[in-house]
Amino acid sequence: MQEKFDIVVVGAGLVGLTAALACAKKGAKVCILDQKKPNIKEDKRASAISASSFVLLKKLGVTDFLVGNIQAIDKILISDSRVGRKNKFNLKFQNLNHANYKGYMIDNSILKNALLKMVKKIDGITIKAPVKILKTSTNSSKIKINLDNNSIIDASLLVAADGKNSNFRKSADISVRFTHYRQSAIVTTIGHEFVHNGSAHQFFFPGGPLALLPLTKNRSSIVWSDSSLASDAAMSLNDSDFIDELSHRINGLLGKIKLLGPRQIFPLNLQMANRYTAKRLVLVGDAAHSIHPIAGQGLNLGLRDAAALADNVALSIRENIDLGSEVIQEYEKWRISDNNKLGITTDILNRLFSNKNSSLRFVRRLGLNGVNHSELLKTFFIEEASGLTGELPTLMIEN
Ligand SMILES: Cc1cc2nc3c(=O)[nH]c(=O)nc-3n(C[C@H](O)[C@H](O)[C@H](O)COP(=O)(O)OP(=O)(O)OC[C@H]3O[C@@H](n4cnc5c(N)ncnc54)[C@H](O)[C@@H]3O)c2cc1C
């Protein structure tokens, strides 16, 4: 069987599904391929969703499936910490309920489920998973994909949303800049005695940041980054010892805490592709960039890739230009500088905060306190974190 689409998205992760929805909304006929059957339960992370990403999810109809599962972030409290010291928050962002800046926390499993539900509702999208791609070949007018179920797909463009180990990036010979942080993040969800009141906490310890992020139903998501050695040791603790260690680090901030699910560990690195395009191919999401979770922005960048790609797709449909032509170079130009800027920022933040150097500690405390006393600087940082700076794709502009 041979089928024809405008776009094939490889990877049914959060970014691939969003890219498919965004491109279909702009009129493209899309096919999503994944090597695995979509599993909403395997990812135990939750994501901080910026204001602009939330607009995108709303415009794509995804938020209709998220009702009751979205936790607004009302406050962000940041502490330059040492284990066993009393909590002192050096930088506080309060009253974040201003509509423009509102950020949210959503469990990745719930978000993926909502995206899949929306994908199934849209006539212009076909999803095939699990399926194996045996071969791809390109010519001047299309890309041809041979699947292991004997079918063949023709498309004008392949969107590689196949994650940080992207095979499509590798086979297109796109090099990456890579920094190994020798850190890992342990992720889990906890329940707690005291209400979180929508507060997100970030404790900067010398080994790495520990984030305590509010979720619905009085739960919190933990992202505990530390040296790979310390993270492996914390992973090997039994549940009760792990909870004791965590309580000690957050100084009983939320009262008694308990684990609500398993722990997952993620090795951390910075990986930035040097190009986002090749012949009839574009990279989106972690296939193009994978950054430290210190600022909770990796997915937000991927969602912005998806929305920017959709604008370029709309242009090529409107002007009747080949999707695989220079239109995708425009996408690359737009996204690569934006993503590199955030990649560098998160890298600097991690280097500045994840160390024991006492002079650096002095400088960063001065910096945190300085920002804390300047409304102008606070607004600048919140606008950046909300994804409201730079050229916004149309699907991310509220109207
Ligand atoms: C600890 C941690 C916390 C984070 N917290 C946040 C946060 O708060 N906010 C935020 O914005 N970001 C956050 N991030 C980043 C975010 O989770 C990622 O950027 C995002 O999940 C990447 O999604 P993706 O769809 O690009 O890739 P993936 O989720 O890796 O999806 C790739 C998909 O491609 C499929 N695939 C792979 N190879 C093939 C193939 N050959 N053929 C077919 N299919 C294939 C896979 O099966 C998978 O479904 C965090 C990251 C970490 C590690």
Image: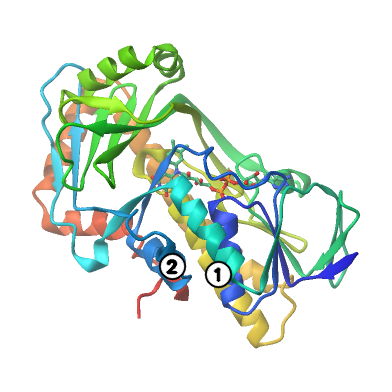
Task: Give the residue number, with chain letter if any, for mark 2.
Answer: 56
Task: Give the residue number, with chain letter if any, for mark 1.
Answer: 22
Quadrant where the N terminus is found in the figure: bottom right
The quadrant in which residue 81 appears is top left
**Residue at 58 percent of width and 58 percent of height:** 17
Whether residue 154 sits left or right of residue 351 in the image: it is: right
Q: CA distance from mark 2 to mark 1?
A: 8 Å
Mark 2, Cα crowd under 10 Å, few <14 / some 14-19 / many 20+, is many
Q: Amino acid at mark 1?
A: Ala
Whether residue 325 sits left or right of residue 104 in the image: it is: right
Quadrant where the C terminus is found in the figure: bottom left
Q: Where ligand 1 lies, by image quadrant?
A: top right
Q: Amino acid at mark 2?
A: Leu
2 and 1 marks in contact (CB < 8 Å): yes
Query: Where 399 sits versus 272, above or below?
Result: below
Assign a secondary structure to mark 2. helix
Assign a secondary structure to mark 1. helix
Residue 339 appears in the picture as rendered: no
Query: Where 330 sits versus 364, above or below?
Result: below
Q: Position of residue 148 (x, y in %)?
A: 86, 48
Query: Where 23 sits versus 33, above or below?
Result: below
**Residue at 54 percent of width and 65 percent of height:** 118
Residue furthest toward the bottom? 319
Query: Where 263 sits versus 23, above or below?
Result: above
Residues 263 and 311: in front is 263
**Residue at 84 percent of width and 68 percent of height:** 3
Residue 77 appears in the picture as rendered: yes
**Residue at 64 percent of width and 87 percent of height:** 318
Q: Position of residue 108 (x, y in %)?
A: 45, 46
Q: Position of residue 173 (x, y in %)?
A: 75, 46
Whether residue 160 sits left or right of residue 251 in the image: it is: right
